[in-house]
Amino acid sequence: MANVIVTLKVMPASPMVDMEALEAKVKETLKESTGETETRTEVEPIAFGLKALKVIFVADEAKGSVDDIAEKVESFDEVNSAEITDVRRAVG
């Protein structure tokens, strides 16, 4: 099976959320779910000081759906929503 490149968009509960702490918590959840994997993060400005955390990571397609990762992240107190916005099969 191939690997997939997944984009997870995390919306914090308020503009006051510490984005660095949130990023570390999300990365730890990814490590528990997918093992050690390549990960890239970026903070995307939304409006009125609110920023979204976009996490792009590689997952093994054989493990099945990555929706459970979004559900785990969404359960965090400092997160308003988390959704998988893109899944692409890795080439190469």
Image (tube, rainbow, N blue to C red):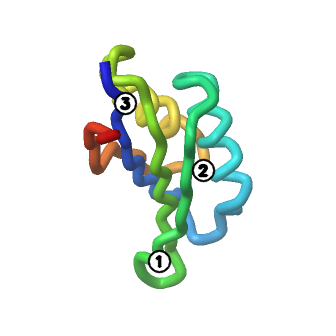
Q: In what quadrant of the picture does the N terminus appear? A: top left
Considering only vertical position in the picture, is 38 above or below 3? below
- Residue 77 at x, y = what percent? 60, 43
Count of numbered badges drawn on the protein: 3
- Residue 40 at x, y = what percent? 55, 54
**Label 1 sits on residue:** 45
Q: Nearer the viewer, residue 33 or 71?
A: 33
Badge 2: residue crowd in 10 Å (few <14, some 14–19, many ≥20): some
Rounded to the nearest angstrom, the CA distance separating label 3 from label 1 is 29 Å
20 sits left or right of 68 in the view: right
**Do labels 3 and 1 touch, CB within 8 Å?**
no
Secondary structure of the residue carrying tag 1 is strand
Quadrant hosting residue 83: top left
Q: Nearer the viewer, residue 38 or 67?
A: 38
Rounded to the nearest angstrom, the CA distance separating label 2 from label 3 is 30 Å
- Residue 67 at x, y = what percent? 34, 29
Badge 1: residue crowd in 10 Å (few <14, some 14–19, many ≥20): few
Marked residue nearer the N-terminal end (2 or 3): 3
Residue kind at label 2, given as amino acid type: Glu
Considering only vertical position in the picture, is 54 above or below 38? below
Q: Which mark is residue 78?
A: 2
Q: Nearer the viewer, residue 44 or 64?
A: 64
Marked residue nearer the N-terminal end (3 or 1): 3
52 sits left or right of 84 in the view: right
**Label 3 sits on residue:** 3
Marked residue nearer the N-terminal end (1 or 2): 1
